[in-house]
Amino acid sequence: MRDVLIIGGGFAGLSAAVVAADENDKAGGDLCITLVNPVDGITIRPRLYECDPGTLRPALRPTLDPAGVVFVESAAEKIDTTAKTVTLATGEALFYDTLILATGSEMPLLAVPGFAGHAFNIDTLEAAVALDEHLSATVSGPEEPGRDSYVIVGGGMTGIELATEMPRRIAAHGGADAVGRSRIVLVERAAEVGPGLGVNPRPIIADALLRAGVEMRLGRSVASVDADGATLDDGERIAAKTVVTTVGLRANALTAQIPGERDSQGRLCVDDYQRVKGVDAVYATGDVAHALADDGSADGGAEQIALMSCQHARTMGKYAGFNAARAMLGLPPQIYRQADYVTCLDLGDYGAVFTAGWRREVQATGHEAKKIKTMINTQLIYPPRGTREEVFAAMRINERGR
């Protein structure tokens, strides 16, 4: 048996494992596919802005077991690309013939005074649950300055979704009265809200924020945070018991143990097949990979690098698993491209906005877009269940190359 070892059980890692197992199965190969993850669960990270985040970690085993993937429940701590070993938190060393790194991204603490002790985030399930528990305690707590104020740092996709969902999260713990007395402030250092989301959906986003009663502080940043609130860089003081940051994603720290070129977010530079450039038998995929998603040939546009997103991670993982397995089986690989980029942004009680293409052309808004967002969040991004063939079929690269 030859070993394909996948580190990380998120969207990219799960896709890689199942697709690699499928390719091995179709070829009648001798590969052993193993996935290592700290818990038997995949965090549905794109939904952590929602109410009741503790429910958003379905098990991995119902998908991995039918596919014949070996699951090891532990954290990887050390990678040795010379010896081809991965050492786990248990002290056990796993050997590999091919390694796929799919450990995702993380949100390091911003270098802002007070963030470490007083700011929340929704980057992980544990962090999102901690925020929810804090909201429950605060909303029902005694009246005091800042109790009903909520500062959200970052006006990108996560910040916008959290800001427009916040009334629901407040209502879940304190009812309509708590929502009525709430103040939600969104702080974004760019001059426009949603700076990375393009100009086309911006008026729709701005209107939803206005209707949700969200105050915006554009062209501003947080200078410090303490137990009683946040101070902005222009000196404005906002009394708030709840400050949540949504900015600063970087590739998981394990990337530093692989001797390859990295981008400004710490992602390993990979070739068209997801192989780490200059490193033998190592692939990187999802949020740890700097990969060309679109070469612009279809519409004459600019080249586009894959984003740190579930959308890209799921597809990138498929290609990494496909190409890693086929390389070991002596079969031709397939170039990763993902030109048909879409965005569906939840706007809480004010619907959603669905865009297509890198220019973010608006395709649907309001209730129609909300139905699309609900389908994505509750069906499309969840791991498949069923028989061996049903799991394989659900994860195969489709006719759109996704």
Image (cartoon, rainbow, N blue to C red):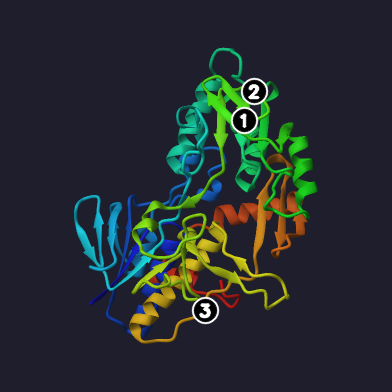
- Please provide percent x and percent y for residue 123: 49, 44
The vertical placement of 66 against 38, above or below, is below
CA gap, disc 1 and disc 3: 43 Å
Lateral position of residue 359 relative to residue 307, left or right: right
Residue 385 appearing in the image: no
Contact (Cβ within 8 Å) of mark 2 with mark 1: yes
Distance between the Cα atoms at labels 2 and 3?
Answer: 50 Å
Looking at numbered disc 2 in the image, what kind of residue is underneath it?
Answer: Ile
In the rendered image, the quadrant that contains the N terminus is bottom left
Whether residue 204 is visible: yes
Label 1 crowding class (10 Å Cα cut-off): few <14, some 14-19, many 20+? many
Q: In terms of secondary structure, where does tag 2 sit? A: strand
Residue where numbered disc 2 is placed: 238
Q: Do the residues labelled 2 and 3 touch (CB within 8 Å)?
A: no
Residue in the picture at 76% in, 49% down:
202
* Residue 395 location (% of width, % of height): 48, 69
The picture places residue 279, in percent across and down from the top left corner, at 36, 71
Q: Residue at x 80, y 47 (%)?
A: 203
Q: Residue at x 56, y 61 (%)?
A: 311
Q: Nearer the viewer, mark 2 or mark 1?
A: 2
Q: Mark 3 points at which residue?
A: 335
Q: Name the residue beneath numbered marker 1.
A: 151
- Three-letter code, disc 3: Ile
All told, the count of numbered labels is 3
Decide if residue 289 is on the left or right side of residue 211. left
Q: Is residue 168 above or below residue 322?
A: above
Question: Alpha-carbon neighbours of circle 3 within 10 Å: few (<14), some, or many (≥20)?
Answer: some
Q: Earlier in the sequence, mark 2 or mark 1?
A: 1
378 over 385 or under it: above or below: above
- The amino acid on which the numbered mark 1 sits, given as a three-letter code, is Val
Characterize the local packing of mark 2: few (<14), some (14-19) or many (20 or more) Cα atoms within 10 angstroms: some
